[in-house]
Image (cartoon, grey):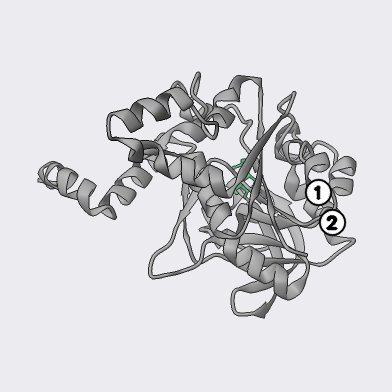
Amino acid sequence: MNVTKAVIPAAGFGTRMLPAAKAVPKELLPVLDKPTIQYVVEEAAAAGIDDVLLVTSREKKAVEDHFDRIPELEARLAASGKPALLASVAALAERVKVHAVRQAEQKGLGDAVYQAKRHVGSAPFVCMLGDTIFSTTGGAESPTTALVAAYEKYGTSVIALEEVPAEKVSRYGIVGGAMVEDGVIKLDRLVEKPTPEAAPSRLAVAARYLLTPAIFACLEETKPGKGGEIQLTDALQLLLAREPIHGVVVKARRHDIGNPVDWLKTNLLYASRDPVMWKAIEPMVRELLG
Ligand code: G1P
């Protein structure tokens, strides 16, 4: 079955980005001139997805507004010879239909994904966390493209993985399993935010998932876990008892924009890769470095 739908949970409060994320959803905070969420939808489009469901909340209407058209603004930009300013989002809207659904209560990532049940129906779908983007160099594929390729090969749910240092395992979902080919693991365990002692490996769940629709029945059975929230990782552990799940170690570099330090680092890194922008910024960076 072709994978044509993506679900992007973007309902969290973004507490690590306060006060910036109080009235502006963290997913709309920019990396250079584009909101983070736009990079996520672009990654989906590049992997062949043409239908995106944003899971938002009553405080985060602006996330879906970003993908809507503003004819008055478009007309004004066209009249002043600056249509290029909205071109990237307009081009994206032509390739991808963006929908939104609301999570009424913040009951966790698993509950957010569950809100997509009706929209997704009976096909496999991609789940992409809205506060994380990936950059690639040297023609490497994006995590979503890699997940779709692995799904085509194995026909199972596939989770993006990244190796993390032992002291950071307690921040992530951590998986255990056996390598079936270079960079591909057949999973036998998933644990949400374990202690380093309890972690089955140092392979962390990295913000992108390709899920079969069987995940929804598992989410219905998932009790609140870490932090009292319905955890997607716990539902995946239930799914593992019913179907095989693979993990793919991603080759792209992950950028979490949910905290100020990583957000700023991401902006600098992206600026350094943009020749025009870097020409303007580099002298200041050199000056700061003395
Ligand atoms: C979520 C997931 C976790 C995963 C992480 C990064 O945690 O629950 O399993 O490793 O995203 O993708 P959060 O960062 O929302 O606490």
Given the current orientation, which residue lies at the most extreme front position?
A: 79
Coordinates of residue 139 in the picture (x, y in percent): 42, 70
Residue position for label 2: 239
Q: Quadrant of the C terminus?
A: top left
Percent x, y of residue 87: 40, 42
Q: Using the rendered image of the protein, determine whether residue 6 is visible from the camera's viewpoint.
A: yes
Please give left or right for residue 232 compared with residue 282 in the image: right
Q: Circle 1 is placed at which residue position? A: 235
Please tell me which residue is depicted at 71% across the width and 59% down the height of the picture: 3
Residue type, mark 1 in image: Ala
Assess whether mark 2 and mark 1 are in contact (beta carbons under 8 angstroms): yes
The kind of residue on which mark 2 rests is: Leu
Q: Nearer the viewer, residue 21 or 223?
A: 21
What residue is drawn where x is 46% and y is 41%? 89
Please tell me in which quadrant of the rendered image residue 30 appears. top left
Mark 1 vs mark 2, CA separation in Å? 6 Å
Ligand 1 shows up in the quarter that is top right
Q: Residues within 10 Å of mark 2 (few under 14, many from 20)?
A: many
| Residue behind label 1 places its C-beta within 8 angstroms of ligand 1 | no
Mark 2 secondary-structure assignment: helix
Most foreground residue, 158 or 1: 1
Q: Secondary structure at mark 1?
A: helix
Instruction: Residue 77: name its quadrant.
Output: top left
33 and 254: which is toward the camera: 33
**Label 2 C-beta lies within 8 Å of the nearest ligand 1 atom:** no
